[in-house]
Image: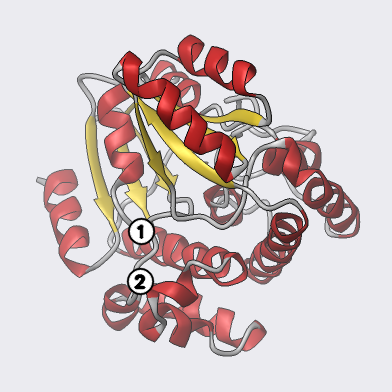
Amino acid sequence: MGKISFLFSGQGAQVPGLGRQLAERSPAAAQVFALADSIRPGTSALCFEGTQEELNVTINTQPAVFCADLAAADALVEAGIRPDFCAGFSLGEVAALTFAGAFSREEGFRLVCRRAELMQQAAQENPGAMAAVLRLSNEQVEQLCAGIGGLYPVNYNCPGQLVVAGSREGLDELAKQAAPLKGRVMPLAVSGAFHSPMMDSAAKGLERYLEEHPISLPEIPVYANLNAQPYGSRGAELLAAQVRCPVQWQKTLENLAEAGCDTFIEVGVGKTLEGLVKKTLSGVTVCRVENSETLDAALALLKG
């Protein structure tokens, strides 16, 4: 086995009960939720018992997924698996940076709560949505968006999958125009047009917040969504701009592979990132950890 990367989940795959099994099994995972409750009372109850509707609200989604991400990563470390690299998709980048020591656990949780507030406020001021476009090239999607107007290619996920943000009407038109090209447009379970200029106010708010809460150099290399390169001295700039700029996920995975990573573990919720690795890279080991069953399967694979 070569080098290992932990990939921290973003929002969109949240489901009721997230993190509960890991918290019941792993003392390290349980500590994540205990800390969250001490800062934002009711967070663990939201994760373990909240409804899908509650979990889909941005100010709830981001703290909940952040906790699930860290709980899964900590459970792996507790079991003897440590990463050489980290990367996080969208809000997962905050969890990745916190795990890697760029923030204390308390600072990281407070940051993700503030990020969620800013992004929900921006989404209310500039209502929008997001959808994944499948089976078309990036160039085709970019051309369609330019022709329709008010749409922004924002998440470059893997070959044949590009997420677009913008107005619901624009996304409906995109679906109509993509169909004759054999493209498929799938709405995402998010409450705003994230990673687009419609999040400008959130980016500015994060800039101000990070001026008062400086980011340290991570102890483990963390690859940034903005440029698919490891975080360095421009940490605050990268993290603030991330909410209004495209996520370069495919390039991130390719750069991690070039750096010698051949084992990728999605930590948090769902299997979205696991799937994107499989669609982007060949000859690598991929697994995920979100509950007790997947933790056992990952440990069997990694230690077998």
Say if 264 sits above or below 268 in the image: above
For image coordinates 78% across by 52% down, the residue present is 202
Residue 276, quarter of picture: top left
- Residue that numbered label 1 is attached to: 269
Q: Position of residue 142 (x, y in %)?
A: 55, 16
For image coordinates 44% across by 48% down, the residue present is 188
Q: Amino acid at mark 1?
A: Val
Q: Do the residues under discs 2 and 1 have CB atoms within 8 angstroms?
A: yes
Say if 128 sits above or below 19 in the image: above
Q: Amino acid at mark 2?
A: Leu
For image coordinates 63% across by 48% down, the residue present is 128
Quadrant (top left, top right, bottom left, bottom right) of the N terminus: top left
- Residue that numbered label 2 is attached to: 18
Say if 262 sits above or below 110 in the image: above
Instruction: Answer whether residue 260 is visible to the viewer in this image.
Output: no
Instruction: Answer whether residue 188 is visible to the viewer in this image.
Output: yes
Name the one closer to the observer, 150 or 241. 150
Secondary structure under tag 1 reads: loop
Name the one closer to the observer, 297 or 163. 163
Question: Counting other residues with Cα less than 10 Å from the Cα at mark 1, is it few (<14), some (14-19), or many (20 or more)?
Answer: many
Q: Position of residue 13 (x, y in %)?
A: 37, 56
Q: Position of residue 9 (x, y in %)?
A: 43, 51
